[in-house]
Image (cartoon, rainbow, N blue to C red):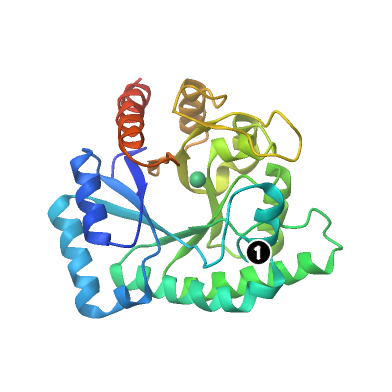
Amino acid sequence: MQPLALGVIVPGSDPLASLARVQALGLSTCQMMAPSAAWAAPEKAEQVRAASRDTGVAITCIFHHFPGETYTDIPTIRRMCGLVPAQFRQERLQIARQQADVAAAWGVDTMAAHIGFVPEDREDPEYRAIVLAMREICDYEHELGLRFGLETGQEKSTDLRRFILDVNRRNLGVNFDPANMLLYGADRPLPSLDVIGEFLFGVHAKDGNWPQTPGTLGQEMPLGQGEVNFPAFIAKLKAVGYSGPLTIEREIEGEQQTADILAAIEMLRGLIAG
Ligand code: MG
């Protein structure tokens, strides 16, 4: 794979259609939302491997997601998303294991997830419980040859670094989304690369703005129109030695999404070559 090989994040509901869409966009990589457990069956897995070969599209990461997650506003995200809400944790760990089984059957080597808002206070009993849950899923995925990237956004980079060190598993790293850090009003992406740049397994190319009002989410923007500063961001990724894939994410739907993705590809190709 080329350094900073461009890709896009795609749905997992129809993996074969998603691979065809990535090929049609002229891209060589993608991250895919985890498909249903049925896709771990040998004949289904072989269909995906064959489609990946035929389209020339590598699946660089499978993204965990869980029933009931809603990303409408920060209080809802705190209550409903990831592995942090205690009432859903055991059920979701089981779902995560099934999703990892699919990735392993496909020969994919990296998972990622938003795990939710990890408590900032290390003395909070829930902090310890989340560290233990992360060890459990990291160890399960390690046995399958998988790495686990924590999607950035919901915490400061220094807190994320401390959490990674506390979990203390070598297959735990970061899926770096520069826009999320801004959208959540959590941290500034460029200086954050100095803090967690050594842990990057994946990077999202998404843009956005810091929230206007504390406690609300900022606005996602087409690439180049938000506050990330992509020329500086790409230069900084190179400076910290990141050479993995660069995965475009645009969280709208329809024709405008396709138009924004095509514009992002054009802009990023120039920056990567520069
Ligand atoms: Mg993202």
Label 1: how many Cα within 10 Å (few below 14, some 14–19, many 20+): some
Give the residue type at disc 1. Answer: Asn
Q: Please tell me which residue is depicted at 77% across the width and 69% down the height of the picture.
A: 128
Number of marks: 1
* Left or right position of 124 against 92: right
Element type where label 1 sits in the image? loop
Q: Quadrant of the N terminus?
A: top left
Q: Which residue is mark 1?
A: 168
Mark 1 lies within 8 Å of ligand 1 (Cβ measured): no
Is residue 144 visible to us here? no
Q: Residue farthest to the left?
A: 54
Q: Quadrant of the C terminus?
A: top left
Is residue 17 visible to us here? yes
Q: Position of residue 69 (x, y in %)?
A: 56, 61
Q: Position of residue 6 (x, y in %)?
A: 32, 38
Residue 61, quarter of picture: bottom left
Q: Position of residue 249 (x, y in %)?
A: 42, 41
* Left or right position of 127 against 101: right
Q: Please tell me which residue is depicted at 79% across the width and 53% down the height of the picture.
A: 120
Q: Position of residue 242 (x, y in %)?
A: 46, 39
Residue nearer the viewer, 55 or 37: 37
Is 86 above or below relative to 63? below
Residue 83, quarter of picture: bottom right
Residue nearer the viewer, 83 or 174: 83
